[in-house]
Image: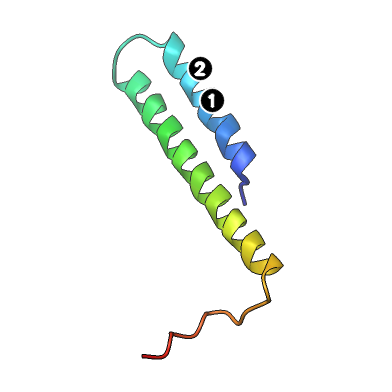
Amino acid sequence: MHDAKECRDRALHCIRLAKVLPQGEERKSYADLARSWRRLGRGIAKSEAELDAWASSEKKPWPPKPAAP
């Protein structure tokens, strides 16, 4: 499984590769891949933050029960 830092590192690697390639499909593919790695990294970081917040809370049951009407 990847962590957020690894995803950011992979995105940076793809950006560096894209910058040295001539305009074209391969350069676009690396730029698209970098965006995907960044998006994945943000998602992982957000999930980790939510889990940390939940773990440090009152240990509420998961999944949370719906509020009463």
Residue sitting farthest toward the bottom: 69
Res. 27 image quadrant: top left
Please give the label number shown on residue 4. none
User: Is residue 59 left or right of 19 when viewed as pictured?
Assistant: right
39 over 15 or under it: above or below: below
Residue sitting farthest toward the front: 69
> Between residues 53 and 62, which one lies in front from this camera angle?
53
Q: Which residue is mark 1?
A: 12
Position in image of residue 65 (x %, y %): 49, 85
Position in image of residue 29 (x %, y %): 36, 27
Q: Residue flagged by tag 1: what amino acid is it?
A: Leu
Residue drawn at the location 60% of the way across and 30% of the way down: 9
Whether label 1 touches label 2, CB < 8 Å: yes
Position in image of residue 57 (x %, y %): 67, 70
26 over 20 or under it: above or below: below
Res. 54 image quadrant: bottom right
> Between residues 16 and 44, which one lies in front from this camera angle?
44
Graded by Cα atoms within 10 Å as few (under 14), some (14 to 19) or many (20 or more), the crowding at tag 1 reads: some
Residue drawn at the location 44% of the way across and 13% of the way down: 19
Residue drawn at the location 55% of the way across and 57% of the way down: 47
Res. 23 image quadrant: top left
User: Is residue 63 left or right of 69 when viewed as pictured?
Assistant: right
Q: Residue flagged by tag 2: what amino acid is it?
A: Arg
Q: Which residue is mark 2?
A: 16
The secondary structure type at the circle numbered 2 is helix
The secondary structure type at the circle numbered 1 is helix
How many tags in the picture? 2
Can you say which quadrant of the picture contains the C terminus? bottom left
Position in image of residue 67 (x %, y %): 43, 85
8 over 59 or under it: above or below: above
